[in-house]
Image (tube, coloured by chain):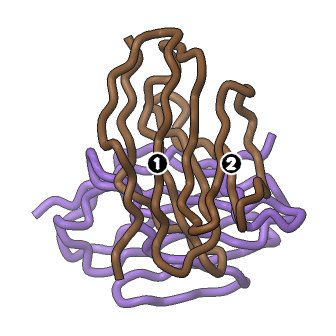
Chain colours: A purple, B brown
Amino acid sequence: QKEVEQNSGPLSVPEGAIASLNCTYSDRGSQSFFWYRQYSGKSPELIMSIYSNGDKEDGRFTAQLNKASQYVSLLIRDSQPSDSATYLCAVSESGGSNYKLTFGKGTLLTVNP
Amino acid sequence: KAGVTQTPRYLIKTRGQQVTLSCSPISGHRSVSWYQQTPGQGLQFLFEYFSETQRNKGNFPGRFSGRQFSNSRSEMNVSTLELGDSALYLCASSRNYEQYFGPGTRLTVT
């Protein structure tokens, strides 16, 4: 059974700090990796995708991928109270099923003003 | 560009009944995936359709089925509803691997 593990949190950071969210996955052949943000009572919103080793930056968000360690992370710089949400890590299945995603249970982030 | 739409947004059904949920993808997106979200199990993949064909399937019983139409709109059906089927059902449309979710259908089985 393919697994995606995340710290459930809650992770609490002060406004303006860097929030670091981590994710490990078991399927060594996975090719596509995603971070979603889900506000309470809402559906998940895609915030980052990453496909190759290294860092990918988009505004205040940086995704990091290390396939050898089977590790994905998301850094949120200058955290804002509006970033308070559950962050879901999603990993595609190996074998060409890039549209079949396995999700972690999510990390609840709270940014304190 | 309009996002993914799902209807209905809320449903209450009784055990043993069946239900059909509908999803309209983002214009130009041909892949539609369905997920079930519950507090205990999180988000779980149900199936994915592309060009009217089921391309991927998750580990759900045969009571869960779906289909896709030529305009890429998709429906999923759950027959013989059980209490454990109460969940948020999410549809996602995609192009180039990135999946964009609709608002979901909240199904309550009593």
User: x, y percentage for residue A76?
Assistant: 37, 75
Q: Which residue is mark 1?
A: B22
Say yes or no: labels 1 and 2 on the same chain.
Answer: yes
The vertical placement of A22 against B90, above or below, is below
- Chain under numbered label 2: B
- Chain under numbered label 1: B
| Label 2: which secondary element | strand
Amino acid under disc 2? Phe
User: x, y percentage for residue A63?
Assistant: 53, 78
Give the quarter of the figure containing the C terminus of chain A: bottom left
The vertical placement of A87 against A74, above or below, is above
Count neighbours of disc 1 (C-alpha within 10 A) and say few if under 14, some if 14 to 19, many if 20 or more. many
Amino acid under disc 1? Ser
The reply, left or right, for residue B3 in relation to residue B35 is left
Residue drawn where x is 36% and y is 36% of the image: B106
Residue drawn where x is 25% and y is 73% of the image: A79
The Cα atoms of the two marked residues, 1 and 2, are separated by 14 Å
| Label 1: which secondary element | strand
Disc ID at residue A90 = none
- Foreground: disc 1 or disc 2: 1
The reply, left or right, for residue B25 in relation to residue B31 is left
Task: Of the two numbered discs 1 and 2 on the same chain, state the one appearing first in sequence.
Answer: 1
Front one among B72 and A30: B72
The reply, left or right, for residue A107 in relation to residue B33 is left
Residue most toward the right?
Answer: A95
Q: Which residue is mark 2?
A: B47
Front one among A37 and A95: A95
Count neighbours of disc 2 (C-alpha within 10 A) and say few if under 14, some if 14 to 19, many if 20 or more. many
Front one among B18 and A20: B18
Q: Which image quadrant is residue A69 in? A: bottom right
User: x, y percentage for residue A26?
Assistant: 78, 52
Residue drawn where x is 44% and y is 24% of the image: B86
